[in-house]
Amino acid sequence: MTDDEFYDTTLRRFFNRLQGWNELEEQRERSNWERTRMLATTVVNLMAKDPKKPGDIWKLPWDKGRNDKPLSPEEQKKRFEQWDKEMQHKWQGRT
């Protein structure tokens, strides 16, 4: 994102782009961990009498499923108010 794009964007569009970037990074991270788990499974299965599945050897957080619940409108409002206060305090007098 260039400086011009940043300063011309709306807050909603900025957060949509941020969320997309975070999802991409999370997907890359998961892919790396899955690759590592598959390699570990292959090494273990070379010596094992009975073959194991990747989930049997190494459980990862997303194997159970996510328990994240969306924030309620009240919780969202509280969080944005808190961020607003923090930013006002941080940038006070610097516009």
Image (cartoon, rainbow, N blue to C red):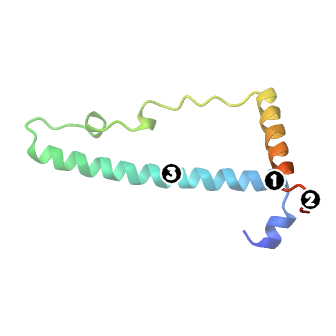
Q: Is residue 93 left or right of residue 57?
A: right
The disc, 3 or 1, on the residue closer to the chain's N-terminal end is 3
* Residue 69 place in picture, x, y as percent: 64, 28
Q: Is residue 58 above or below residue 12?
A: above
Which label lies toward us, 3 or 2?
2
Spatial separation of the CA atoms under disc 3 and disc 2: 40 Å
Is 85 or 60 nearer to us in this picture?
Answer: 85
- Label 1 sits on residue: 90
Task: Tell me the residue that label 2 is attached to.
Answer: 93
Dot 3: what SS? helix
Indicate which label's residue lies in the foreground, 3 or 1.
1
Sequence-earlier tag: 3 or 2: 3
Q: Residues within 10 Å of mark 2 (few under 14, many from 20)?
A: few
Q: Amino acid at mark 1?
A: Lys
Inspect the image, locate mark 2, and give the three-letter code of the amino acid beneath it.
Answer: Gly
Residue type of the residue flagged with mark 3: Gln
Q: Picture coordinates of residue 95 (x, y %)?
A: 91, 63
State the image coordinates of residue 93 (x, y, percent, origin top left).
Answer: 92, 59
Residue at disc 2, secondary structure = loop
